[in-house]
Image: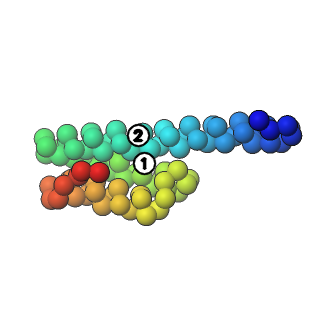
Amino acid sequence: MANIKQQKKRVGTAARQRLENLRYRSTIKTLTRRLERAAQEGKADEEHRELVRVIDRAAARGALHRNAAARKKSQASRIVSGGGSSDS
């Protein structure tokens, strides 16, 4: 544990940021599963837009690497188009 006051503050800040990043990643997984269900029903347009928006926001704030974000968006578009597998 840190002894220095500023480092104690940083530990708290890092913990909050870690939880926020976890929320982004979890939301992306949830929206991806929701998109897969919607694609089977043929109503994936709105779900896809929402997923891409969350992925872009996560990448912009650093919760997700930009290449990982691009990969997830590509997977999402493949789910919508009905081509390829989504086994990741």
SS at mark 1? helix
- x, y percent for residue 49: 32, 50
**How far across and how far down the image is residue 56, in percent?**
44, 55
Q: SS class of the residue under badge 2?
A: helix
Label 1: which residue? Answer: 54
Q: Position of residue 34 (x, y in %)?
A: 27, 39
Callout 2 crowding tier (Cα within 10 Å): few <14, some 14–19, many ≥20: some
> Label 1 vs label 2: CA separation?
8 Å
Q: Nearer the viewer, residue 18 or 42?
A: 18
* Residue 63 relative to residue 68: left or right: right
User: Does 61 sit above or below residue 47?
Assistant: below
Work out which residue is located at the far right of the displayed protein and give it: 4
Which label was assigned to residue 27? 2
Dot 1 amino acid type: Val
Q: Residue at x 23, y 52 (%)?
A: 86
Indicate the quadrant containing the N terminus: top left, top right, bottom left or bottom right.
top right
Asked if residue 81 shows in the view, the reply is no
Q: Residue at image x 55%, y 54%?
A: 62
The amino acid pointed to by label 2 is Thr
